[in-house]
Image (cartoon, helix red, strand yellow):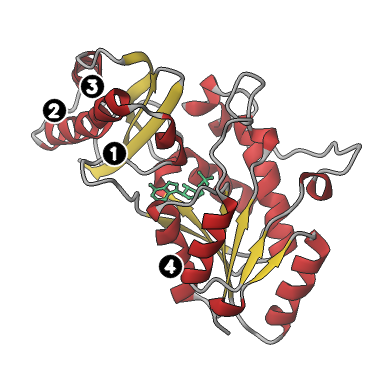
């Protein structure tokens, strides 16, 4: 089967039937959930899913449950026609494009909350965000029943929350984490980069620079968290257009707790606001 025949399906039951048919014939299914406005970061996940499975399934769903009341759900970039072209180009077999009312029927009241790690980092700034993510991803997994699901390291916290949920709730699939795809100047690709004006776009380079300099400092032997944090905050504060630093530090990649003494594998992560736009980035390093 090739993507030229890509089926676009909006009804959850119809997606379930289509996927089940493949599974019954012992075909593997690779699944990439997205919110659309597809860029090369998404495409890297889709390509890997395409390569590693018999059937490649993508979903596009702007999930209102993971946006707070003051967040950008209404203005989140949407470009469905172009997205469909890109998915066909990547030879995706099935695009699941659910309607809101079919995923969340009236009276919907069941939520998945992955305790503790959902409250760390971005969770502290986006109450309820990861509950919304875990709930919709669990629903999508139940509908598609993938063999493997692909997520980007750019959203590192999301990957460990999903892995925890898969383990805790006995989902039968593998989670594959794919490297962050970057623009030429190092900025991590994100649908939200479209919000940035020219000056903000230039200023956004500070995230990657900050991660690299922190990484170099750790590799040169600095092991005290406070020193690295000071360095990171100094670099970001040097960029006048950054109006808030949500966090910038070094974390244990399992618990997302700050590490007092940096050793072994650590996560360097940063989140800032440029105007109204929140940008995040991270780097895993072996110190
Ligand atoms: P989103 O549409 O933002 O929900 O993203 C869908 C998937 O693409 C998530 O697993 C993201 O982590 C992943 N993703 C987004 N940006 C990138 C990137 N620059 N590199 C790799 N994966 C990404």
* Of callouts 3 and 2, the N-terminal one: 2
Q: Which residue shows up at 44% across the image and 50% down it?
A: 152
Q: Which of 34 and 25 is in front in this view?
A: 34
Q: Nearer the viewer, residue 32 or 97?
A: 97
- Find residue 187 and name its label: 1
Q: Residue furthest right?
A: 107
Q: Does the residue labelled 2 lie within 8 Å of ligand 1?
A: no
Relative to 28, 105 lies left or right:
right
Determine crowd level at label 3: few under 14, some 14-19, many 20+ residues with C-alpha closer than 10 A: many
Q: Which mark is residue 222?
A: 2
Circle 4 or circle 2, nearest the eye: 4
First-in-chain label (3 vs 4): 4
The residue that mark 4 highlights is 47
Disc 3 to disc 1, C-alpha distance:
16 Å
Cα distance, mark 4 to mark 2? 38 Å
Q: Are discs 3 and 4 less than 8 Å apart at CB?
A: no
Q: In this view, does 92 lie above or below 64?
A: below
Helix, strand or loop status at disc 4 = helix
Q: Quadrant of the C terminus?
A: top left
Query: x, y (%) of residue 271?
Result: 38, 26
Report the residue marked by disc 3.
232
Q: Earlier in the sequence, mark 4 or mark 2?
A: 4
Instruction: Report x, y in % for residue 159.
Output: 49, 46
Q: Distance between the residues labelled 2 and 1?
A: 25 Å
Specify the quadrant that holds the N terminus: bottom right
Q: In which quarter of the image is residue 178?
A: bottom left
Circle 3/circle 2 CB separation < 8 Å: no
Disc 2 is placed on an element classified as loop
N-term-proximal mark, 3 vs 1: 1
Label 3 vs label 2, nearer the camera: 3
């Amino acid at each position: 089967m090739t993507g030229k025949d890509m089926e676009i399906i909006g009804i959850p039951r119809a997606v379930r039937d289509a996927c089940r048919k493949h599974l019954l014939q012992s075909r593997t299914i690779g699944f990439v959930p997205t919110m659309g406005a597809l860029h090369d970061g998404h495409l890297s996940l889709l390509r890997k899913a395409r390569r590693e499975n018999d059937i490649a399934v993508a979903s596009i769903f702007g999930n209102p449950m993971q946006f707070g009341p003051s967040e950008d759900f209404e203005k989140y970039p949407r470009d469905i026609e172009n997205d469909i072209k890109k998915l066909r180009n990547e030879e995706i077999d099935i695009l699941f494009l659910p309607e809101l009312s079919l995923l969340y029927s009236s009276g919907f009241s069941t939520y998945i909350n992955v305790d503790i790690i959902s409250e760390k980092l971005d969770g502290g700034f986006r109450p309820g965000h990861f509950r919304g993510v875990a709930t919709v991803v669990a629903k999508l997994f139940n509908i598609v029943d993938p063999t493997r699901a692909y997520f980007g390291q750019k959203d590192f916290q999301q990957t460990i929350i999903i892995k925890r949920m898969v383990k805790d709730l006995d989902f039968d699939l593998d989670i594959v984490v794919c490297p962050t795809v970057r623009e030429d100047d190092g900025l991590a690709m994100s649908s939200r980069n479209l919000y940035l004006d020219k000056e903000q776009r230039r200023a956004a380079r500070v995230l990657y620079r900050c991660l690299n300099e922190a990484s170099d400092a750790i590799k040169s032997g600095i092991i005290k968290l406070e020193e690295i944090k000071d360095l990171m905050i100094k670099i970001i504060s040097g960029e006048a257009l950054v109006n808030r630093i949500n966090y910038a530090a070094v974390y244990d990649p399992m618990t997302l707790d700050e590490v007092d003494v940096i050793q072994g594998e650590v996560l360097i992560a940063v989140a800032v606001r440029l105007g109204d736009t929140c940008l995040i980035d991270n780097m895993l390093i072996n110190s």
